[in-house]
Image: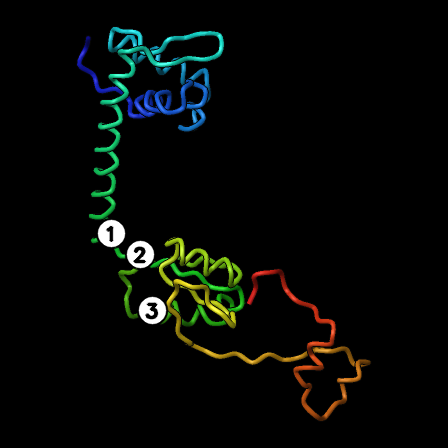
Amino acid sequence: MTKRWPDLLVLELLVGVDEKGSLSAAARKVGMAQPNASRAVKELERQFGMPLLRRHPRGATLTPHGTVLAHWARRVLGETSRLLEVAQSLQSERSATLTVGASMTVAEHLMPRWLGALSGARPEVNIHLQVHNSVRVAELVLDGACDVGFIESPTVPPGLHSGTVARDRLVVVVPPSHPWARRRTPVTIAELAATRLVVREPGSG
């Protein structure tokens, strides 16, 4: 056997066959077309000089040799993942990144000034802005996809720490023919609750 490093993707295929029980399922897991996966495994078999798959009409399973090598492939892939994590950590030390989520109104009217001030004060920070409705922003912060979120919602989901950074004012808009158009007294909450309103999608602030 020639001493040549196997491709990591074919090692993922080998582990995938061990976990999923078929080459087709393993190919789907790694995002590879079935014919390409079959050729990759055959090349690995030639490189190692032993059969790794037992092929049959319903698919393919690992041979005893393939099972042993899948065990070691899993360890190699685990160490490779740790290598990538270390590299990413080292990169983060050189360049800090901040991912900000904001509801649509906040992103349009407030974030340009806020992010401009932050960039001026901390130019070394790479800022990524994600714009969604309030519910989605809260979900992204809970999932760790955003470092901080700005929403316009009367309530905050459990598990999030929150603070008020600004206040806005809601204005009722009606056509000129509406009875409220020439009204001089404030509209009450009860009147608003009894009136049909045009609202945004579920999840908005």
Q: Quadrant of residue 203?
A: bottom right
Q: Secondary structure at mark 2?
A: strand
Residue 171, placed above or below residue 98: below
Question: How is colour applied across the structure in the image?
Answer: rainbow
Q: Quadrant of the C terminus?
A: bottom right
Q: With 131 as the anchor, is 162 left or right in this view?
A: left
Q: Quadrant of the N terminus?
A: top left
Q: With 141 as the anchor, is 196 left or right in this view?
A: right
First in sequence: mark 2 vs mark 3: 2
Of badges 3 and 1, nearer the viewer stands 1
Looking at the picture, how far across and down is residue 121, in whole percent?
29, 70
- Give the labeled residue for mark 3: 118
Q: Quadrant of residue 118?
A: bottom left
Residue 167, placed above or below residue 115: below
Of badges 2 and 3, nearer the viewer stands 2
Q: Secondary structure at mark 1?
A: helix
Looking at the picture, how far across and down is residue 2, in whole percent?
19, 10
Amino acid on which disc 2 is placed = Thr
Amino acid on which disc 3 is placed = Leu
Residue at 51% x, 63% y is 134
Amino acid on which disc 1 is placed = Ser
- Give the labeled residue for mark 1: 92
Between the C-alphas of marks 2 and 3, the distance is 12 Å
Query: In this view of the protein, which residue sits in the foreground, 82 or 16?
Result: 16
Q: Residues within 10 Å of mark 1 (few under 14, many from 20)?
A: few
Q: Residues within 10 Å of mark 3 (few under 14, many from 20)?
A: few
Between the C-alphas of marks 3 and 1, the distance is 18 Å
Q: Are marks 2 and 1 in contact (CB under 8 Å)?
A: yes
Q: Secondary structure at mark 3?
A: helix
First in sequence: mark 3 vs mark 1: 1
- Give the labeled residue for mark 2: 97
